[in-house]
Structure formats: structure tokens, C-alpha cells
Image: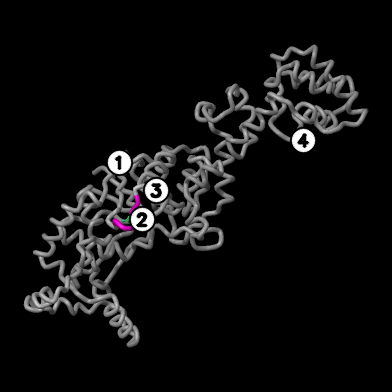
Amino acid sequence: MTTVTRFAPSPTGKLHVGNVRTALHNWLLAKKTGGKFVLRIDDTDAERSREEYVEAIRADLQWLGLVPEGEERQSLRTDLYEREFQRLVSAGRIYRAYESAQELDLKRKILLGRGLPPIYDRAALKLTEADHAAKASAGEKPHWRFLLDHDQPIMWNDGIRGAQNFDPRQMSDPVIRRADGSWLYMLPSAIDDIAMGITDVLRGEDHVSNTATQIQMFTALGATPPRFAHEALLTGSEGKLSKRLGALGMADFREQGIEPEAIVALLARLGTSDSVDPSLGADALAASFDLSRFGRAPARFDEADLHRVNAQIVHRLPYARVAHLLPAGMGEPAWDAIRPNLAHIDEAREWWQVVTGPVTAPAFDDETRAFLAEAATVATALDWQADPWRALTSALKDSTGRKGKTLFLPLRQALTGHDHGPEMAALLPLIAKEEAVRRLSA
Ligand code: GLU
């Protein structure tokens, strides 16, 4: 059976690192076996869902290369929910209840006060048809609860957490539909997972208790539950997914010069003890993706790690991937010379400026100026096509006796205006010979 996974964000905000990790892992899980990754927009909450977030989610997935093979929208699937709902009502698995939020709260407090778990007491189950009729004529509208089967123990073998056991008697029958007819998350999600043929549900451990309930929904709907795996939550460097990380979207990372490949490389391994390998592309990451590598301890996301991985990624990016982002005239040899020095692609502009000039060199003392004047003379006679840096430095070493820093640093400073930078052997041939001579004699 082909693996089918889904990413099911609610479009009530932009994707943050935690959501993106879930999306990525579902994508990797599907790709690993040539399966299918589907995007499901959970927009049953009409008030909080926004079209701009739907578009941002699509754009972020596209940018990250996590392109879904299909997209579904819950707001367009309510006919299906209605049909399945009626089926479960007829089967006696959904019942009407009327308690207000305050009443429920009071019930909970009383139970807690007695040291008992705050489980819904199923009072509404005891209502007769006459009671319901009386409520209806008084203008009271019911909300709806799913009836858990107390005789059916809930267990599954979680792909990350191992054997899981829940006692339905210790759980409240969940409200699945509001009095105004609108849907809560729980039932539509199970209906969709069945209809969309989802084989693997991989999500955060904040959904573990939902899974317990949904497993009974799958069974009540006549389906075999999918495989489940729940990942430990992400924490920031200060513990718990910090406000900052929760608020940072992909657009913010884009602005900081973070490449999608860096996010993918880091998040693919976050939560495992495997090291991040910037040389692995998405396909290799998928091939090596393995749920059993993930632990139950919270995974720590550190922005500094992301910047470090980003630099490693930038150093490897081929010219074809970045050509459209580079300043006009900057070709492949220039990119290859300059990329080992970059933390962000954007910085290529600064080094290209060094190549094309003008550059500002520091003030040199007389002795250094004499040395540089000699360098200019040597340079004038060089064949610029044949490793001019090596030819220049070895000629100067012989004629002046300078070596090491006293040989290289003034040349670098005069030629680039910087103390550090890309390998001079790669950089110098990019600078036109006349321009190099001019800088040395300036
Ligand atoms: N819309 C739900 C969420 O964002 C989906 C959870 C799921 O079933 O994966 O939490």
C-alpha cells in the first residue's frame, strides 16, 4: 500500500518552525517510499480562517520544496461531514447535549473538588425524546457529542512513542459539533483521513489524546485507523517553543537570508541524535528518514544553528541555483571563488563590488608602498590567464625576501580593501589586470 501523508494546518496564522517541521516530516515520510503528500486546509473555523494565510501556507511549502500532490479544503467538504454525521447519529454514536459552558465548568469543578477526574457525566444521554422536544420548543438547540465505547480499550503502536493505551472510561465524550451546526476539529479530520486514504498520521504530541478519541471514530466509521506517530514538541533555546519562534514565519527567515535548503536540512534531523548534513538534498534526506530515530525528549531549535547550517548550505550552492540572485556580470568562476566566504547569498554583492572596484585600501607606510609598487611592476608583466596570484607572490617572495603575512597581507589589502576574504588565487583572476595594477600602484 502506498504511503499517503497529510499536512493539515488551520489557516489562522502563518506557518512557524514547528508547523514546518511537521509538514517536512510528512513530506519526507511520503517521499521515502514514493508515496503521496497531501495538503489539507483545516478551515472549518470560518471566523478565524483567512485566505491570506491559505496563500501564505501554499507559498511557504512551495519555497521549501514541499510541494503537495493534492490539496483539500475542509470548508468545501461539509456535505461529506453531514452524511457521515447522520450515519453516526443513526448508529447511536453521536448524541445531543445542552449544557452551557458555565454548567460544564461547574461540573468539572465539583469533580475536581472531590478529587475525581473531570470527565463529562453523560447526563444528556439520559434525556428522553420528550425532554428533547421540550428543549426544542423552548428554543434550546443541542450541540453534539461523540459517544465513546467504554468497552473498547484504545491502543496503538505509536511510530515514535511506542505502545499507547487509553481507557475510554477516563475520557470525556468529545463535543464534535456546535449548536449552530459548525464543526469542531475532531470528527471532520477523522472523516477526511479515511476519505483521503491517509495511511500515516504524523503530528505533534499535543495531539496524542485526540488520537485516542479519533481511533474510536475511525472504527465507528467502519475504517481501520491509520498508523500514528507523535513527535515531541519543539522548544526554543530558552525552553518551550518561544514566543519569538512562534511568531517568526518563513518570510522572516527569507528576509534574514536563510535558504530553504538550510531549514530543510536542519528540521529533517531535529529531534534525532543524527547530525545535520548540509550535503544531503531532499531526496537523500527522505531516503534516510526514519521515525525510530526520533526521541521523546523535546527537540531544541536554536536560531544560531540555523544560521550555521545556512552558511554551510550557501557554500555548496551551485551557480545555476543562485545565478538569478547575483549582481549582473557575476559569472560562475566568481560565484565559485566567493561562495566559501558567504553566510548569505546577498553578501555576494559586496564581494563582487570588490572585484569590480573601486576599493578603499588602508594607508600604508613607505616601506609597504615601495613593496606594492614593485608588486605593480611584476603584475604588469604577468600572464593573467595562468594563476597570476601564484606567479605574483612567488616572484615577490624571491625579489623581496618577504614571506607569510608580510608578503600576503599588504597585497590582499591593496587589492581588495579587506584583511580577510575569499582565496586570493581564485579572486585575483576575476579582477582585470589593469585594475589590479592600478590598485597596487595607488
Ligand atoms: N488542523 C489541526 C492542527 O493544526 C490538524 C491536526 C492534525 O490532525 O494533524 O492542529
- Confirm or deny contact between disc 3 and disc 2 (CB under 8 A): no
- Disc number for residue 419: 4
Tell me the kind of residue under disc 1. Answer: Gly
Q: Nearer the viewer, residue 86 or 210?
A: 86
Q: CA distance from mark 1 to mark 3?
A: 13 Å
Q: Residue furthest bottom?
A: 114
Q: Quadrant of ligand 1?
A: bottom left
Q: Secondary structure at mark 4?
A: loop
* The residue at label 1 has a CB less than 8 Å from ligand 1: no
State the predominant SS element of the stretch in magenta. Answer: loop
- Mark 1 or 2, closer to the camera: 2
Q: Position of residue 12 (x, y in %)?
A: 37, 55
In the picture of the structure, the residue carrying the numbered disc 2 is 203
**Mark 1 or mark 2: whose residue is earlier in sequence:** 1
Q: Secondary structure at mark 3?
A: helix
Q: CA distance from mark 4 to mark 1?
A: 51 Å
- Confirm or deny contact between disc 4 and disc 3 (CB under 8 A): no
Disc 2 residue crowd, few under 14, some 14–19, many 20+, Cα 10 Å = many
Q: CA distance from mark 3 to mark 2?
A: 9 Å
- Mark 4 or 1, closer to the camera: 4
Seen in the picture, residue 427 relative to 3 is either above or below; the reply is above
Q: Secondary structure at mark 1?
A: loop
Q: Is residue 48 magenta?
A: yes
Q: Secondary structure at mark 2?
A: strand
Tell me the kind of residue under disc 2. Answer: Arg
Q: Which residues are magenta?
A: 46-50
Q: Position of residue 90 (x, y in %)?
A: 9, 64
Q: Quadrant of the N terminus?
A: top left
Q: Nearer the viewer, residue 77 or 397?
A: 77
- Disc number for residue 25: 3
